[in-house]
């Protein structure tokens, strides 16, 4: 579900002095469980969507084909969600190269997210995020998590004078994402439904070709693990996707209310498969966008190459 939190991985933490991890979140709690059932030909649709996204990305065009979006109340221009922090609130080091990946770890602290018995979404998100971080850094990418423990990011927000913890959390996430300027942002969540038969991953994307291309790479790989045929969804009303400046996606890795998904998300082996799928999708995205193989991109972007 979508109230996000991000944590700094130890790799970049050594390079960023006093980094107070901010991050962008998505909006109000989502219910992708209520999206419409897809038709039998969605596998071919997904493949076509991925191919179209790649063409659009190369041409610099946005391609926003998706399932119907989930509606959330839009914020007004004077809404506290649109507030900007003072320059002094940013504590990132401008001399540090931007990370390749910023992982937004959903929920945390007082905000447990979706619940099934004594199982909390926030704990699943953190476990998957840590395993994804490990695989990505092992592959040579620079990665930042916005939280590596169980705490609420709203506690880090000392600059926004608003009584709503949720609003402070959203603003903190957004500010971190836009300060660090990662090549891409992945926000991890777990879904929930009244129907126990609802299963599988859903990936929400921004209304631009880069985000859609990333979403299709992740969606197809997670579909292969879960045996589903879901398509990426245009999440145009979500706070994180509306305001994050880097190509961003929200990944609902499975349903906490489905026994099969739950078993996968709570086993080390299952989470490792999920993390590997995300790693491979990131590799495909960065290789395509940077027009060069491997972490860090081509030789034309030497400053972004990972430290050896």
Image: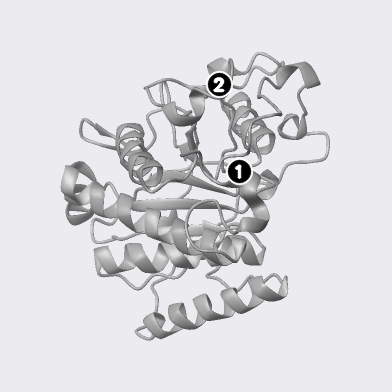
| Residue 176 appears in the picture as rendered | yes
Most extreme residue toward the right is 78
Look at 35% across and 34% down and name the residue there.
126
Q: Which of marks 2 and 1 is in front?
A: 1
Look at 43% across and 56% down and name the residue there.
32
Q: Do the residues labelled 2 and 1 touch (CB within 8 Å)?
A: no
Depicted 230 relative to depicted 119: above or below: below
The residue under label 2 is 154
Q: Dot 1 lies on which element?
A: loop
For label 1, the crowd category at 10 Å Cα-Cα, with few meaning under 14, some 14 to 19 and many 20 or more, is many
Look at 60% across and 37% down and name the residue there.
24
Q: Is residue 53 left or right of residue 60?
A: left
Depicted 144 relative to depicted 280: above or below: above
| Residue 34 appears in the picture as rendered | no
Q: Who comes first in sequence, dot 2 or dot 1?
A: 2
Colouring scheme applied when the structure was drawn: one colour
Look at 54% across and 51% down and name the residue there.
296
Count of numbered badges drawn on the protein: 2
Residue 201: give its label: none
Residue 182: give its label: 1
* Residue situated in front as seen by the camera: 143 or 37: 143
In percent of width and height, residue 295 lies at 49, 52
Depicted 148 relative to depicted 249: above or below: above
In percent of width and height, residue 211 lies at 59, 60
In percent of width and height, residue 134 lies at 34, 39
Q: In which quarter of the image is residue 116?
A: top left
């Amino acid at each position: 579900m979508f109230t996000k939190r991000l944590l700094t991985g130890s790799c970049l933490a050594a390079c960023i002095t006093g980094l107070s991890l901010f991050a962008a979140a998505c909006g109000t709690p989502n219910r992708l469980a209520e999206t419409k059932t897809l038709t039998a030909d969605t596998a071919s649709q997904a493949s076509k969507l991925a191919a179209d996204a790649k063409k659009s990305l190369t041409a610099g065009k946005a391609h926003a084909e998706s399932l119907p979006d989930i509606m959330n109340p839009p914020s007004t221009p004077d809404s506290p969600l649109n507030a900007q922090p003072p320059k002094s609130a940013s504590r990132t080091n401008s001399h540090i190269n931007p990370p390749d990946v910023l992982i937004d770890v959903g929920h945390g602290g007082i905000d447990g997210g979706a619940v099934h018995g004594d199982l909390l979404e926030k704990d699943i998100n953190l476990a998957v995020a840590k395993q994804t971080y490990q695989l990505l850094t092992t592959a040579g990418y620079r990665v930042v998590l916005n939280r590596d423990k169980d705490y609420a990011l709203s506690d880090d927000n000392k600059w926004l004078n608003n009584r709503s913890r949720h609003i402070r959390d959203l603003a903190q996430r957004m500010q971190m994402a836009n300060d660090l300027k990662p090549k891409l942002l992945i926000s991890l969540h777990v879904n929930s439904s009244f129907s126990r038969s609802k299963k599988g991953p859903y990936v929400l994307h921004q209304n631009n070709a880069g985000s859609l291309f990333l979403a299709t790479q992740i969606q197809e790989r997670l579909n292969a693990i879960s045996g589903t045929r879901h398509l990426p969804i245009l999440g145009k009303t979500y706070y994180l996707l509306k305001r994050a400046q880097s190509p961003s996606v929200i990944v609902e890795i499975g349903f906490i209310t489905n026994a099969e998904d739950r078993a996968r998300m709570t086993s080390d082996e299952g989470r490792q498969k999920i993390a590997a799928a995300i790693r491979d999708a990131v590799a495909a995205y960065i290789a395509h966008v940077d027009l060069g193989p491997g972490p860090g991109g081509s030789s034309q972007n030497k400053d972004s190459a990972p430290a050896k």
